[in-house]
Image (cartoon, helix red, strand yellow):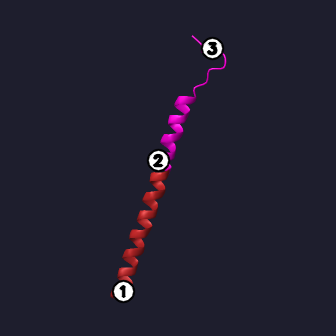
């Protein structure tokens, strides 16, 4: 049975957008954390030489 005219599926779209934003933010945070870790390792190795 079709939905009445004008009724949109905005709740699911909002949930999906929230989920995707959470995913992208997590990915960015992980990349930044990885960069910081690598910088620390490089700095430490340069200090030992």
Closer to the camera in the image, 18 or 35: 18
Q: Choose top left, top right, bottom left or bottom right for residue 33.
A: bottom left
Location of mark 1 (residue): 47
Q: Residue at x 63, y 14 (%)?
A: 4
Q: Nearer the viewer, mark 3 or mark 2?
A: 3
Closer to the camera in the image, 19 or 34: 19
Q: Residue furthest right?
A: 5
Q: Secondary structure at mark 1?
A: helix
Structural crowding at the residue carrying mark 2, measured as other residues with C-alpha within 10 Å and reported as few (<14), some (14–19) or many (≥20): few
Location of mark 2 (residue): 23
Structural crowding at the residue carrying mark 1, measured as other residues with C-alpha within 10 Å and reported as few (<14), some (14–19) or many (≥20): few
Q: Secondary structure at mark 2?
A: helix
Q: Nearer the viewer, mark 3 or mark 1?
A: 3
Numbered range of the magenta stretch: 1-24
Cβ atoms at labels 3 and 2 below 8 Å apart: no
Question: In the rendering, at what x and y percent does residue 47 appear?
Answer: 36, 86
Q: Quadrant of the C terminus?
A: bottom left
Q: Measure the C-alpha gap from mark 2 to mark 1.
A: 36 Å
Q: Which mark is residue 4?
A: 3
Q: Earlier in the sequence, mark 3 or mark 1?
A: 3
Q: Measure the C-alpha gap from mark 3 to mark 2.
A: 33 Å
Question: In the rendering, at what x and y percent does residue 9 appear?
Answer: 57, 26
Taking the magenta stretch, the answer to whether it contains residue 23 is yes
């Amino acid at each position: 049975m079709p939905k009445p005219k004008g009724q949109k599926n905005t709740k699911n779209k909002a949930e999906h957008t929230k989920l995707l934003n959470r995913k992208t933010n997590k990915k960015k945070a992980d990349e930044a954390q990885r960069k910081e870790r690598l910088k620390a390792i490089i700095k430490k190795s340069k200090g030992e030489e």
